[in-house]
Image (spheres, rainbow, N blue to C red):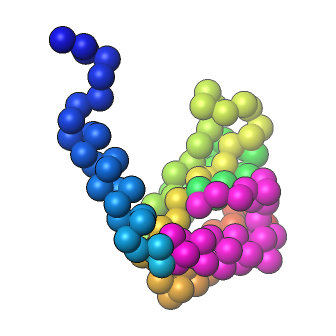
Amino acid sequence: MNTTALPPTVIASALAAIDLIEREPQKRQALWDNVLFFRTGLNDLGFNTLESTTHIIPILVGDAHTAVRLANDLMEEGLFIQAIRPPTIPEGASRLRITLMATHTKQDLSRALAVLEKAGKKNNVI
């Protein structure tokens, strides 16, 4: 028995995901449309997104305590955006990490940008 092999359920899930990507390319396009819209909005507000080019968008905060405070303020407004801080990343490079999905609506993203703007100003991030 090979204990390092992936379980059949993981393989089946990966194959199903590939099948979905092939059958519904519009979902991938919707994701990239959302990424462009949201990243542009963040940059226009003055957030530093570290030149991210993926659907996982960082917002550089710097100070770990500020990143946690910002994440808590966002959670109070209904946005779950994790603070990433040392030891995961180097001191002074703390950030928020946002993961977008194709299923987010423009209304969802616009609301998130408004909440981020308010919290970013409150915490002197923008």
Task: State whether residue 76 appears in this view.
Answer: no
Look at the picture and state if 64 lies above or below 119.
Answer: above
Q: Looking at the image, which is closer to me, 25 or 53?
A: 25
- The spot of residue 94 in percent (x, y) is 68, 43
Q: Residue at x 42, y 64 (%)?
A: 21
**Drawn side of residue 10 relative to residue 68, left or right:** left
- The spot of residue 51 in percent (x, y) is 79, 57
Q: Main secondary structure of the magenta part?
A: helix
Residue 44 occupies which quadrant of the picture? bottom right
Q: Residue at x 35, y 65 (%)?
A: 20
- The spot of residue 107 in percent (x, y) is 50, 88
Q: Residue at x 24, y 46 (%)?
A: 12
Q: Residue at x 37, y 71 (%)?
A: 23
Which range is magenta?
28-55
**Drawn side of residue 12 relative to residue 56, left or right:** left
Q: Quadrant of the C terminus?
A: bottom right
Look at the picture and state if 93 lies above or below 18.
Answer: above
**Drawn side of residue 102 relative to residue 57, left or right:** left
- The spot of residue 36 in percent (x, y) is 68, 74
Q: Is residue 125 magenta?
A: no
Task: State whether residue 93 appears in this view.
Answer: yes
